[in-house]
Amino acid sequence: MRKTLYLFAPLFVAALLLFTPLAARAQKDGGEAKPKADAKVDEKALAVVTRAVEVMGGPSFLGVRTVVSKGYFTEFRDGVSGIPDTFRDYLVLPDRDRTEFKGSHFIQTFAGDTGWAFDGKKRMLNDLTPEQLAGIRTTIRTSIDNILRGWWRAEGASLAYVGRREAGLARRNEVVRLTYPDGFEAEFEFDAREGLPAKVVYKKEGADGERVEEEDRYAQFLNIQGARFPFVIDHYRAGVQSSRVNYDTVEVNQPVPDSLFAKPADVKSIKF
C-alpha cells in the first residue's frame, strides 16, 4: 500500500501512498520516471519487484488515485504499547496527504514540498520545518509505493538483488536494495513464496548522531477493489518495536476536496 502516517514530536509515522516531490513531478510530466544514465537496475531485482506489483493487484494497484483510511496508531516505549490514538487519513496522488489524530487533536498536511501541522492542545498552527520535510522524504524513500511504482527512478537510485534471507520457520524473503546517489540505502524484503512485501530495513541518524537501524514490517494484506493493502504496519528501531498502525477501513478512488490540504488562515477555522 501506502504511505506512512508521520509523527515528529508529536508528529508521527504510519503508512499509505506518498510521493517524493521529484517523483511527483516526474509523474505529472508523463507517466513512469525513467532511470538516469548512471543508475543501475539489476534484472533479477526488477523481476522480484514486478512479481510483487502483480501480487498487489497489478493494474488495480497501479490505478489507485485516492485513498481515505481510518484506524489506530499506537506508540511503544521499551517494547510496551501505549494507548491507541484514532486517525483518519486523506491521500490524493501524486503529492497531497492529510492525517488527523482524534485523541491527540493533531493534524498534519503535506502537499508537494511544503506542509503544515496543527497542535490542538497547544492551539498552534505551523509550517513544517526543513528537518521535518527531510524526515518525510526518508519515509517516502522507504515506502512500499516507492519501490513498487518506480518513483526511485526519478532520483537516479540503483536497484540491486541482494539474495534470500531467513524470515522465520521454513520461510525466506527475497531481498532487493535501493541505493541513492547521496548514499542512502534501503533493503526491501518480499515473501519468497507469495511475493508480498514483508519488510523494509534502513538506517537513519539518531539524536546523538549515530546511525540506527529502522524497520517496517507489513502484515494482514486485504483486497480493496482489486488492490491489496497491509492493514498492520509495525515499526522497529534498533530491534525494539516503537509503533503499530492498524487500519480499520480503506477506501480507494473516492472524491477528496482540495480544501482539506490548504493551510487555514488561523486556528479558529480548523475543523476535524
Image (cartoon, rainbow, N blue to C red):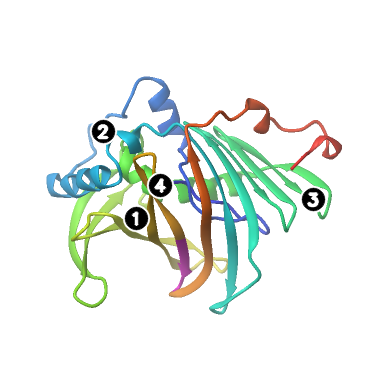
What mark, if any, has residue 120 been given in the picture? Answer: 3
| Crowding near the residue tagged with mark 2, few <14, some 14–19, many ≥20 C-alpha atoms within 10 Å | some
Q: Which residue is mark 4?
A: 1
At label 1, the amino acid type is Ala
Q: State which tag comes first along the sequence, 3 or 2.
A: 2
Asked if residue 262 can be seen in this view, the reply is yes
Q: Secondary structure at mark 2?
A: loop
At label 2, the amino acid type is Pro
Query: Which label lies toward us, 3 or 2?
Result: 3
Mark 1 → mark 3, Cα distance in angstroms: 35 Å
Residue 39 left/right relative to 137: left
Q: Residue at x 52, y 59 (%)?
A: 246
Quadrant of the drawing holding the C terminus: top right
Q: State which tag comes first along the sequence, 4 or 3.
A: 4
Q: Was residue 236 drawn as part of the magenta stretch in this picture?
A: yes
Q: State which tag comes first along the sequence, 2 or 1.
A: 2
